[in-house]
Amino acid sequence: MSNLLLTMKDIEKSFPGVHALKKCTFSLEKGEIHALVGENGAGKSTIMNILTGSIPYDSGDIFLEDKKAHFKSPKQAQEAGISMVHQELNLMDNLTVAQNIFIGRESDNIFLNDTSINKKTKELFEQLNFHIDPEEIVGNLSVSLQQIIEIAKAISHDAKIIVFDEPSATLTEKEINQLFKIMKELKKTGVSMIYISHRMNEIKRISDRVTIMRDGEYIGTLSSEKAKIEQIIQMMVGRVIYEERKKVSTVIEGQKPILCVKNFSSKDVNNVSFDLYKGEILGFAGLIGAGRTELARLIFGADKKTSGELFIHGKKVNINSPFHAVKQGIGYLSEDRKRYGLVLGMSVSNNIVLPKLTDYISGIFINESKIKEVTKEYIEKINIKTPSEKRLVKSLSGGNQQKVIIAKWLLKNCDILIFDEPTRGIDVGAKSEVYKLMNNLAKTGKSIIMISSELPELIRMSDRVLVMCEGTHTATLKLDDINQTTIMEYATQQ
Amino acid sequence: MFKLIKKGGMQKLFAFSALILIYLFFAFTGKNFTSSATTLNILASSYYVGFLALGATFVIISGGIDLSLGALMMASALIGGELYRDAGFPLWLCMVIMVLFATFVGLLNGLMVTKLKLPPFIATLGTMMGCLGFGSIITGTSSKYFPTILEPDGWFIRTFFKSANGVPLGAFYLLAFFIITFIILNKTKIGRYIFAIGNNEEAVRLSGIKVDLWKTLAYVISGLSVGIGSIFYAATYIVVIPNTGNGIELQAIAAVVIGGTSLAGGIGSLTGTMIGVFIMSVLKNGLISINLPAPYQVFFTGLVVIGAVLIDVYRNKRASKVKLK
């Protein structure tokens, strides 16, 4: 049965100094949802960028419906029916939904015809069984709705193949369900999809087959239904990784809280109070928009609160800016590390010492040798993979970038660490390392607040879980009560 | 010199080879271009733009822009002249006031950008126009004269422009100022923070650093440089005419850009800025040596700016292409 839609055979690609793809193979059937997994740097994006004509390849063949194909640009690939939904949104915030979807194809003559594209957009959303006003300004929509517009844009090109590059990274459980519903609808109409993701349970849920890549090589293709998650992970990393769920809380009972938040309120946060203990990992659960990041930013002084008091070691402190927060020993690892966490154009060492630079001054001069010494120590201590402490942070992988930020706050000797989505966009191997690191920090007496939209991660790591819903604190769950159902119940309470 | 090129990367290498090429071009085609008189002129015509450009480099690396440079320098020189001629202040005091005034306006720029959250372009456009008007108002739109070489205060020219035997002393002050600013930018935390802020201001703020303070300081440094520059401008030209000085800020910004400092912030070097200043100065004197009038200088400077930035853009593009995996 020749159900084959796409075959990529023996694809070779080298970048200067990197052999990115080694005789890589990939095939896709008609109407199939095919997951593509691998650690960061495994070559998933490279092979998909080659398929969609974004980058050229060195050798190998691509067959589309038995015909040889070679796309020199994304436009050519689009015309042949291959579209890609990128991880980063490429939308114009000030244009309407319809104007975004039909950008470059506004009308057949020189005049714009908004009525016609609005109508087409409406039909498109009806087909997807989704209701978004075509005339809404995109900037007013949530990130997840914007993602759906990206998908609609891909479909509007009469795509036969749609590549999804980690769409779920910014979506909540509920929105992922909606996305999967759309994907299933599309599948019925005969569209094939390639789904890149790091999340194993999603792959099991949505895909028919899964292809695993490692270090630029094709490792194998399994039936998603039959494959075990452990088996997939093992093929991805070539080794066994497992981090056990906490069974007994390591927090000493009866001690006084190190951080005490009382009646915090702002535009997005509604009268939240909680305590944090020494050596504790306190998970923050909730849907996107529940106000978890907003609350964290209030504690850190990054945004202004309208009311609330903060006690550290029982003493009342005023924190009006990150400067004060850092002085009080609070460190914040943002969910968007490239935007809020790192100075990408500077070296690893400059990033690590940034909050503590004042301590590395001799006279008026920066003491570079002392900085080198201490950053080398931290690079080794938490295993940051970088050829040198002088390497620019932007050239490191996501996991290692995250470790640079952790090193930064450890060097500053912060006792209270707020991890906001610490494993977003980093691969399985690095994730497991971040978990280990967090557990070690807790063991040495640091207190951690962990915001995460990945429930398995929260369940695995937390001593207690604080659940929020629409800005309100709805529950605090003890270790024994932490499970997926209970968390979701409280997260969707209102 | 090789170490300098290695440290500063490609853009400085391009700028430096452009400087050599332009110099060689005029050395072969120009009349008396390699003579000591022309060499002195090359050094002499780089004084005040040099000071402005060094200061502006700080602001531009921090991700801002300072359009008030030229107008502020003129306003500061006019105030000095007014106080010297009409109020009878001693010259040294006038010089101190000139520097203080410009530094104060720099501080105002910084506060408008950090505390009032005005875009740097608008804030400094405002002070630029303010300075133009202010200079005319306090002088009643009459020109101000600094002491000539024959007056009792003739030391002014001999110290800040050319010595009695024609040595361009201003160039030495510029070199000294370059070394000081170089140390501030590369060896102290002021410089490190300014680079970091230009790269990612929000990440720096969330690292617990007082971003507003350091950003304001960049504008203060720029103002201070303008104040010092105004002394050398006065010593060079003696006559300061109200309502002139437009466009000097653009020459300074052009020198900064030619030297490889990115207008987007976060990237830049003072060595590059000095090379940029000298490229413009060589161009000016070279065109005179092949008998082309002043407007040609402006024209060719324009071409050099576009060329320099083009090279930078393409180089960055190629670099990012290689990184795409």
Image (cartoon, coloured by chain):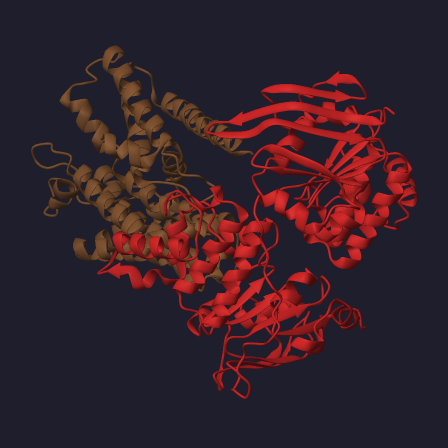
Measuring from the top left, give residue B317's x and y in whole percent.
51, 30
Task: Identify the residue at image location x=25%, y=49%.
Answer: B183
Q: Residue furthest left?
A: B165
Q: Residue furthest top?
A: B29
| Residue A352 quadrant | bottom left
Chain with red colouring = A
- B149 lies left or right of B145: left
| Residue A112 quadrant | top right
The quarter of the rendered structure image containing the C terminus of chain A is bottom right
Q: Is residue B130 visible?
A: no
In the rendered structure, the colour chosen for chain B is brown
Task: Identify the residue at image location x=34%, y=60%.
Answer: A357
Measuring from the top left, give residue A343's x and y in whole percent.
46, 50
The quarter of the rendered structure image containing the N terminus of chain A is top right
In the rendered view, tell whether residue A290 sits above or below residue B281: below
Task: Identify the residue at image location x=48%, y=44%.
Answer: A396
In the rendered view, tell whether residue A65 sits above or below residue B325: above
In the rendered view, tell whether residue A91 sits above or below residue A190: below
Task: Identify the residue at image location x=26%, y=34%.
Answer: B4
Count of numbered marks:
0
- A100 lies left or right of B162: right
Front residue of B309/A203: it is: A203
Front residue of B75/A79: it is: A79
- B97 lies left or right of A163: left
Measuring from the top left, give residue B207's x and y in whole percent.
46, 61
